[in-house]
Structures are given as C-alpha cells and as structure tokens.
Amino acid sequence: MKNNRYIVIVGCGRVGSYLANQLSRQGNSVVVIDRNEAVFNDLSPDFSGFRIEGDAIHMEVLNMAKLKKADILIATTHDDNVNLLVAQVARKIFNVSLVLARVFDPKREEVYAQLGIDTICPTSVAAEMFLRAVAKGSLEKEGGQP
Amino acid sequence: MKNNRYIVIVGCGRVGSYLANQLSRQGNSVVVIDRNEAVFNDLSPDFSGFRIEGDAIHMEVLNMAKLKKADILIATTHDDNVNLLVAQVARKIFNVSLVLARVFDPKREEVYAQLGIDTICPTSVAAEMFLRAVAKGSLEKEGGQP
C-alpha cells in the first residue's frame, strides 16, 4: 500500500504514540487525539502530524480531525467502550475504510466483529503466547520493541 | 512436553484465569495465587488446582504454593514491578526452570532479559499487529479466544 495515507489515531498511550511515530516516519499524514495533552510528550521530535487535545467521543473533535478524509482510524485508548464507540462512528458515519480497535475484554471481540470492526485483543494474544511457551518449554519471541 | 507439570500462576485476572483453566484441563497441577479472593470466581467449575489468596511478593505465600517443586512459574499480575520481583525470586531462589512474566512497559523487557526471565509484552505485540494491519490494509487474526 502507498505510504501517504491519512490516519487518525485515538489514544496516545504507549501503543498510540508508538504507532503515531512509526506511521508518521513512514510518510503518512497522522492525526493523534487524546484527552490528556501531557501524553503528547511521548511523540518523537520528528513527528510531523497533528495533535488534537479532546475527547474523541465528541463529533466536533472527530470533525476537527477531518475523519471524513481518513483512510484509516485506529482506536487505542485504554477504555474498551470508547474504542468501540469511536470505531463504530468512524465506520458508519464517516465511512472510514479501515477501522482498527484495541479491545482488552476478549468477550467484546464478537460484538466488534458483528459491527465490521477489526480488533486486536492484547489479552488473548498474551494468553496464547503463554500457552505456546508452556507447551514448548520456552518462549518464542515475536513482534518488535515500541 | 509432558502434561503433568507443576505450574504456579501469580495473578488471576483475565490472562491468569484463562491459563489456569486451560493448563489444569490439560492435566497439569496448577496453583493460582491472587491477593483478591473474588477473582477466583473466574476459574471454571472443573478447575482442579489450588487457589491461594495472598500476596506473592511474600516468601511465605510462595512457600505455601510449594514453588520449590514448580516446573513453571507464570507472573501475570497487572503490576510490572510485582511480576519482575516474583519472577526473579522464582528463578534465583527457587530455581524454577521456566519463568515467564508479563510486562506492559516495553522498556523493561531488556531488564528482564538480562535477568534470564522470558517476557511477553502485550503492548509491543499489539503495536506490531496494528502496524502490520495498516501495511496490509487489513487485519490478520492470530491467537485464540480466552
């Protein structure tokens, strides 16, 4: 895929800030939204995107982020309900073509799937990695280092 | 590997209780430790292991869990510091051969590695999964459903 996509990231914690830095570095246009301005300090000095301080459950914040123009929305706050709501709005109202959400509660993954939202559940992934490590007697590392 | 190992799990949250249920079902002897007795409700009715209500940073709790006999220790509380401490004690004092710990802060993974402790970092894993999904334009699911 091309690397000049318009990407809106909701939540600038460890995962959100890492993604914002990486995706901006790759040449994408990145907008990052968080309620807490202080977390923007985790963005690297060469982050070339926009920061919006605000609550993404409000339409005016999503409008400010020009979500209508977005190719991708990533919802990665620490609140599953916020991620679900923002992801639904992005999909249904703003017609964003790729919507990804983090969900901590594996039981909610089904709900998301029914709504056409792709989820990443760190809880499930960690559990399966532990099980594989126990079965093998050692840990097989994968993934990178944000 | 054989399925009658002695496994101590510290932390009975979503990941800990899922692992306890699965590993017990596979035929292992499982002991699960948590400070909060209420979380043991997440263990399935057919869980055949032991529950210990207590703080695993105390030696008497680890002794009560017979950690000396354990083949595997899994530290999966929500507190990185507790996981690091318990994992170190299991490795250095109780000579447990396989010690696995969850760590949310990717910056701590190096410290664990230097101490000979295998870590799983849901933060890093989620971030890499998001990046791959963005690169491909869709999400490739892996892992199971606790």
Image: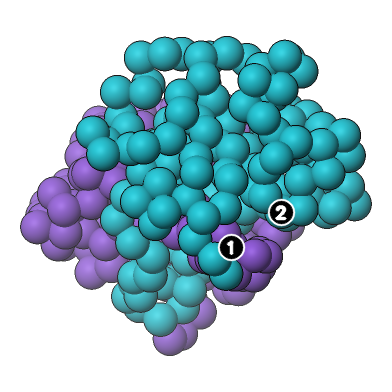
Chain colours: A cyan, B purple
Residue annotated with mark 2: A98
Pinpoint residue B81: horizontal percent, then vertical percent: 25, 33
Location of residue B140 (image quadrant)? bottom right
| Residue drawn at 88 percent across, 47 percent down | A115
Mark toward the viewer: 2 or 1: 2
What amino acid type should be assigned to the residue bearing mark 2? Answer: Leu
B11 on left or right of A45: right
Q: Quadrant of the C terminus of chain B?
A: bottom right
Of the pair B131 and B113, the residue shown nearer to us: B131
| Quadrant where the N terminus of chain B is found in the figure | bottom left
Q: Amino acid at mark 1?
A: Ala
* Residue A44, image x, y percentages: 27, 36
Helix, strand or loop at disc 2? Answer: strand
Circles 2, 1 touching at the beta carbon (< 8 Å) = yes
Residue A3: image location, x then y, percent: 49, 61
Chain containing mark 1: B
Circle 1 packing at 10 Å, graded few (<14), some (14-19), many (20+), is: some
User: In 3D space, how far apart are the residues under numbered discs 2 and 1 (Cα atoms)?
Assistant: 9 Å
Instruction: Report x, y in % for residue A27.
Output: 41, 54
Q: Which mark is residue B133?
A: 1
